[in-house]
Image (cartoon, grey):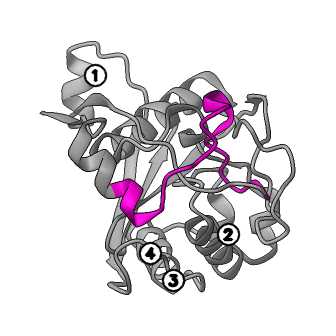
Amino acid sequence: MALIGCSDTPVFPFPLSALCSLGILSKRNEEPAKASRPYEKNRDGMVLSEGGASVVMEELNHAQDRGADIYAEIVSYASTAEGQDVVQADVSGHALVSALEHALIAGKMRAEEIDYICAHGNAMPSYDVAETNAFKAFFGNHAYKIPISSIKSMTGQSFAAGGGFQVVATSLCLKNGFVTPTINLDETDPMCDLDYVPHHARRYSMDTALINSHSVGGTHAVLIVRRFP
């Protein structure tokens, strides 16, 4: 049994000024609630945020013996790195494709078994395009049948806490039969033309979900989780 937690508090003068100097933050200051716009045509960068998340991970028998409320089952995990640039993603998506491939191989799964993707979607132009291209390259026509959404449209980019937020949100989606929306998606970027679940949550019964998270510097992490019957 393990207790796994993550947190970050980057809303502080030094990190804020560093990110401003890199030019990766949204400048939509007059509409803060609409500033985080993943996959949207007029997106102009990410919104910085803070937070923390924690989960309990344990063997199935142990969870059942203590009568735990099981939210999801871990299937597999993989990570890769492209090491191309500190802030710009490789828009071809090759590194993410490799992570997707390794995660599905480890889980002994077919691409068609993925029902939903909780994507990184931080509203940085190159990141969103790279993700979209990777999903198209790996899933083929099936990519257009998978609901995909970004919780960062609502939570912002909290860096170290972001992956934890995605795990918690996806586990709740699996357990309760819905997918979270990508808010502020008013006009889709033509280069991001997948089903990014605009504006409103969607009732959706599913068995298996994939979580994709990207880190500054080019690291991609993929986690596959399954609804516990």
Q: Which residue is mark 1?
A: 64
Query: Which quadrant of the figure has residue 99?
Result: bottom left
Q: Looking at the image, is 20 positioned above or below residue 217?
A: above
What is the chief secondary structure element of the magenta stretch? Answer: loop
The kind of residue on which mark 2 rests is Thr
Characterize the local packing of mark 4: few (<14), some (14-19) or many (20 or more) Cα atoms within 10 angstroms. some
Q: Tell me the CA gap for discs 1 and 3.
A: 43 Å
The kind of residue on which mark 4 rests is Ile
Q: Tell me the CA gap for discs 4 and 2.
A: 21 Å
Give SS at disc 2.
Answer: helix
- The circle on residue 105 is 4
Query: Which quadrant of the figure has residue 188?
Result: bottom right
For this view, does 178 lie left or right of residue 19? right
| Residue stretch in magenta | 19-41
Characterize the local packing of mark 1: few (<14), some (14-19) or many (20 or more) Cα atoms within 10 angstroms. few
Instruction: Give whichever of discs 1 and 3 has the lower sequence position.
Output: 1
Closer to us: mark 1 or mark 3?
A: 3
The number of discs equals 4
Q: Which residue is mark 2?
A: 132
- The circle on residue 90 is 3
Q: Tell me the CA gap for discs 3 and 4.
A: 23 Å
Q: Looking at the image, is 188 positioned above or below residue 182?
A: below
Closer to us: mark 3 or mark 4?
A: 3
- The residue closer to the viewer here, 165 or 158, is 158
| Residue at image coords 27%, 34% | 60
Closer to us: mark 4 or mark 2?
A: 2
Instruction: Give whichever of discs 2 and 3 has the lower sequence position.
Output: 3
Characterize the local packing of mark 3: few (<14), some (14-19) or many (20 or more) Cα atoms within 10 angstroms. many
